[in-house]
Amino acid sequence: MGSVNETSIDDFILLGFSKGPMICSFLIATVYLMVLTANLSVFSIIQVDSHLQTPMYFFLSCLSILDVCYSTVTLPAMLINAITGNRRISFNGCFTQLYFFICVGGIECLLLAAMAYDRYVAICSPLHYILIMKKRVCSYIVTGCCLLGFINSMLHTLMTLRLTFCGPRLIYNFLCDVLPLLEAACSNIHSNQMFIQVDTVVLGVFTFLIVMISYIHIISTILEIHSSEGRKKVFSTCSSHLMVVTVFYITGIFSYNGPKSGKSFTFVRVSSIINSVLPPLLNPVIYCLRNNDVKTALKKASTGI
């Protein structure tokens, strides 16, 4: 236990790791190293291989960096929490983590929609693909995703900052996220809840519709291809992205639409881990296993050809 001088009444207490800190520490460290190695490997391969200098792989490289950031926002703090047993997090540290967690998650949501649009243009309008998805346009799209993510996260953070938090400031989670912080507040959170609902529609439902509409057109185009080999080849170029989108949205729904923390602490902890770990860990694996171009580039890099 820290002394009065070592802690502050403004600190939050993360009620995450209570048992088996050594096991948790080992698992978190292992997963974090795997996430870093896998995503940075994919990013590096895309940067150095001349055959992967296309819009699809440009977006994939951005996704890899986002996944590294997503894990870095949460897993190192979880690791320190598990090793030291110190469950306290400062007020500033909590809201810094909140800002970057929402920011990176929002950017990834928008980027996945942009990647779906890229596959739509490539498969449904292949003759116009080079004209539409120019390098400059792709850069603008990524920049726009980042700006929207920054703004969205700033609004969430500012609205949460205006709340009053009464002692003992318990956070029923491994990290500082919006919903656990709202539960820790002792002031009116109605406006925050309304903003979350609006944000869910604008950022969540809207991007999900873009993905679904894009893939409805993609599947319709694929079905019009007479050759079964041609259909298989075309579908293989977008199946990886469809799997990544599925993992991202399922884990997000699982994390933010389950029971409240006070009702099911175990559920909250499990969903938090899944949402923080599963997408960054599986995304590079899915792309490497399902994408022949990436597998070929990785083989070349490993053999030095």
Image (tube, rainbow, N blue to C red):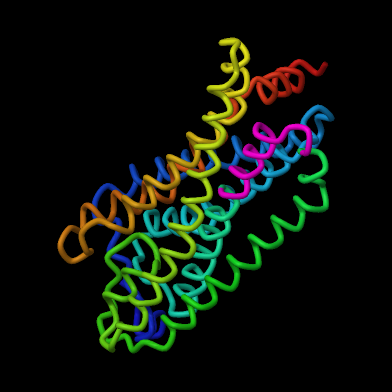
Relative horizontal placement of residue 151, taking residue 137 as reference (left or right): left
Which stretch did the figure color magenta?
113-128
Say which residue appears at 28% left-offset and 54% top-offset. Answer: 269
Quadrant of image for the C terminus: top right
Which residue sits furthest left? 263
Residue 121 in the magenta stretch? The answer is: yes
Say which residue appears at 43% left-offset and 80% top-offset. Answer: 91
User: Within the image, what quadrant is residue 181 found in?
Assistant: bottom left
Relative horizontal placement of residue 17, taking residue 74 as reference (left or right): left
Q: Nearer the viewer, residue 58 or 179?
A: 58
Q: Main SS type for the magenta part?
A: helix
Say which residue appears at 26% left-offset and 86% top-offset. Answer: 186
Residue 206 in the magenta stretch? The answer is: no
Relative horizontal placement of residue 200, taking residue 229 as reference (left or right): left
User: Within the image, what quadrant is residue 103 found in?
Assistant: bottom right
Q: Is residue 112 visible?
A: yes
Q: Nearer the viewer, residue 261 or 6?
A: 261
210 lies above or below 191 = above
Say which residue appears at 35% left-offset and 46% top-offset. Answer: 24
271 lies above or below 292 = below
Q: Nearer the viewer, residue 302 or 258?
A: 258
Place of residue 216 in the rendered image (x, y in percent of width and height, measured from the top left): 50, 37
18 lies above or below 239 = below
Place of residue 211 in the rendered image (x, y in percent of width and height, measured from the top left): 52, 45
Quadrant of image for the N terminus: bottom left
58 lies above or below 230 = below
Place of residue 114 in the rendered image (x, y in percent of width and height, measured from the top left): 62, 49
Q: Is residue 289 visible?
A: no
User: Within the image, what quadrant is residue 48 found in?
Assistant: top right
Place of residue 156 in the rendered image (x, y in percent of width and height, measured from the top left): 47, 75
**How many numbered tags mark residues here?**
0
